[in-house]
Image (spheres, rainbow, N blue to C red):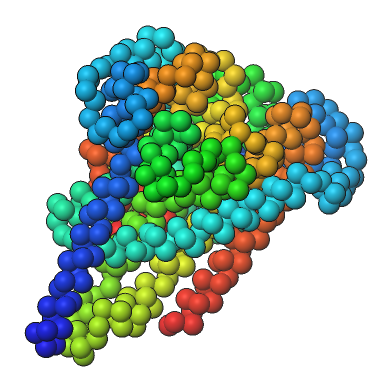
Amino acid sequence: MIRDAKKEWLIAFVLLTPFLAVYGLTFVYPTIDMFLLSFTDAPLIGEGDYVGLENYTRLGSDRRFDTAIWNTAYFVALSVVPGTAVALGIALGVSRLTGRMQALILALFFLPYILPVSVVYRLWDWTMNFQFGIAMHVFDMLGIDRVPVFKTTTWFMPAVAFITIWWTCGFNILLFLAGLRAIPQEIYEAASLDNAGRWTTFRRVTWPLLWPITALNLTIQLILQMKIFDQVYLFSTGGRPNDNLVMVYYIFQRAFQSNHGGRAAAIAVVLFVIVVAVSILNFQLTRISGSGKR
Amino acid sequence: MSPATARRFNVAGLAITVLTVVLAVLWAFPIYWGVVSSLKPDNEVVRPYIELWPDTLTFEHYVFALTQTQIGYWYMNSIATALGVMALTVGSSIFAGYAISQLRFPFRTALWWFILASFMVPTQVLIINHFVLMANMGLLNTWAGIILPQLIHPVIIIVYKQFFDQVPKDFREAAIMDNASEWRILFKVYIPMNWGVTTALSIVTFIWAWNAFLWPFLAVTKTDMMTITVGITQTNDSFGVYYASELAAAVLAGFPVALAYLLFQRRVTEAITLSAGIKG
């Protein structure tokens, strides 16, 4: 069949126009603008002068930037591997159930994920309330001293990581369940014929076959948690925001609270580069490990 | 397997199942606790022991949240902006996905790589420039200003391309034989054949937009233009120390998405696994 190439180009262009317009305006242009802004001393709104790399070099001696980097790394460490492990455990448990029971139990684990972050904040701020929170009643019963969790620097990040796992775990459970369903039942039958125990079956069959999904879960979480802001911001209100700074929070603080558009853009560029680098590395690693399998 | 080991295995299996069920109940407990607390009168809320059901059931905190805050406006703003994000994202993605999947045009491969690459870019780093852009366009404190920066969801285009790729070529060729235009092919063949995906993706984009915090929080400074997700966090003063009223507002904010999930459970989970790059 003869294709009318010119006409096809035109139709493609018309179809792509909404996408091109939106991405050009709210994605490509802001990204370029971010790089340009990072070389100036502009306030949030308004013009600034070109200052070269000054905004970047001063990050080296910026203690808040150090705090933000370390807290982000700390949060990633507290949430990515533990979150994936918890999700795997729950998914293995849920996959043993069937029918309506499975749907019900899965819904209980998944429900938090569907809630807005501010609702999650209200629920846990109330649960962990120093005076009246139900968690503190439990602490009392166990003979642990009450702590104002979100106002104590030591407790803040672990608590927020715990709540984040509670909130988002449902997503990872879903992915694991999809992965578990894809493992052929015959392999398990063969394993049980060989008298393989529960642990051996998991280690020799489930774990290796599930590895691509585990890697996907780890990747998605790693990239997601490097960009954390909402929970940290909300739980910091009335607490100690400067001790709890994470990267996006610091961008927000510099730009919107200190009115330093240029300096904030430099921090944004650093985070941009880190996230893109990790994504590319991840992509390469999954590709390599994927091709090794086949 | 000997009978003894089989029995031991079943006991272990039963233990795992019971543990899973108990954990599920504990997992959902904070949600239950928040809802129950919002239904208690203030003097019961602060009692120093755990009461799983209110002595006196009251809706006074809901009445308070509905009448003494601007929650009506927040609902309206959330519904309008979430619907806007949903319609514009899904609409533009269907068109782009179809063009990339079915049409041949210059720079098609380059465009596809651009979409895949844009997947990696964290939109959170763009908040400064989004703010400057929206301020210059005079769109702060407007629905359009809340919606526009939230339309970057390359994954929706990726999913549509994959699904359109799988529609058998025969349909397309038969339609072309009948002299059907590209529009007819898209609207009469490709979109109807993928209603399921469209429903699923629409529900999740709606939920994403409803739940979005960072951008709507930055784009709006007027209380009556806030979305509900942002609004309920900005009310410490008007509530005083009344925890139950804060919780009632939170329940009102979470209710629509929780309901959407419970009604469309299968679609939601399908769309979420799709958005992670897994075909269900």
Percent across and percent down for residue B14 are 17, 66
| Quadrant (top left/top right/bottom left/bottom right) for the C terminus of chain B | bottom left
Horizontal arrangement in the rendering, residue B67 relative to residue B115 (left or right): left
Above or below: residue A55 compared with residue A294: above
Number of numbered callouts drawn: 0
Residue at screen point 34% across, 26% down: B47
Percent across and percent down for residue B149 are 56, 34
Residue at screen point 79% across, 39% down: A263
Q: Nearer the viewer, residue B46 or A289?
A: B46
Q: Residue furthest front?
A: A143
Residue at screen point 26% across, 63% down: A93
Residue at screen point 21% across, 62% down: B17
Percent across and percent down for residue B112 are 53, 56
| Quadrant (top left/top right/bottom left/bottom right) for the N terminus of chain B | bottom left
Horizontal arrangement in the rendering, residue A195 relative to residue B142 (left or right): left
Q: Residue furthest top?
A: B67
Above or below: residue B252 compared with residue A223: above
Q: Nearer the viewer, residue A100 or B155?
A: A100
Residue B51 seen from this side: yes
Above or below: residue A20 compared with residue A84: above
Quadrant hosting residue B172:
bottom left
Horizontal arrangement in the rendering, residue A196 relative to residue B251 (left or right): left
Percent across and percent down for residue A244 are 64, 42
Q: Nearer the viewer, residue A172 or B64?
A: B64
Q: Residue furthest left?
A: B3
